[in-house]
Image (cartoon, helix red, strand yellow):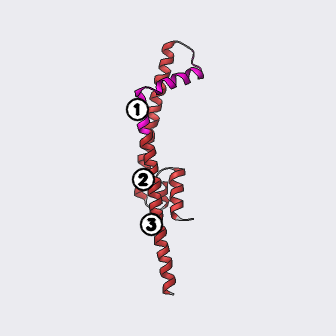
Amino acid sequence: MSNALKGVLMSALIFPGAGQIILARYGRGALFFVFAFISGLLCVAAIVRQAVVILQQLAAQGEGVTLPKIMTTAVEASTTGSTLFLKLSFFVFFCGWLFAVVDAWRIGKELDAQQNEAGTGQVAEE
């Protein structure tokens, strides 16, 4: 399996930065990991904040909390401007993940080219 494919699969399927770490680019891998971790925490914080608002709305109405009522309230809440932070944090998380995958592919391609050159150089010398 090529280095490019290993890097892409690790960064895409495991976590951003995993591809860089498997390709021995530890600093970059740690940077992508920390970026994704922090932006993921911001996403979770925004989701929890939105859930608390929804539950407070339901409690203020004095009605029983049922799944259909939660779904209706969630749809109504998602159309307001308060979800802008959530959408922005998801966008940042997704872009960071995508950039990590592309970077792992680029690093893997460079390593594959170096290995091919080293292999070709040895054959020519013999």
Q: Residues within 10 Å of mark 3 (few under 14, many from 20)?
A: some
Whichever of callouts 3 and 1 sits on the residue coming sooner in the sequence is 1
Residue 118: x percent and y percent?
47, 76
The secondary structure type at the circle numbered 2 is: helix
Give the tally of numbered discs.
3
Q: CA distance from mark 3 to mark 2?
A: 20 Å
Camera-side mark, 3 or 2: 3
Point out which mark residue 84 bears.
1
- Tell me: residue 35, above or below residue 81: below
Q: Which residue is mark 2?
A: 30
Q: Residue at x 59, y 23 (%)?
A: 67
Instruction: Specify the amino acid type for callout 1.
Output: Leu
Q: CA distance from mark 3 to mark 1?
A: 39 Å
Magenta stretch bounds: 64-89
Q: Which residue is mark 3?
A: 110
Instruction: Specify the amino acid type for callout 3.
Output: Glu
Contact between marks 3 and 2 (CB within 8 A): the answer is no
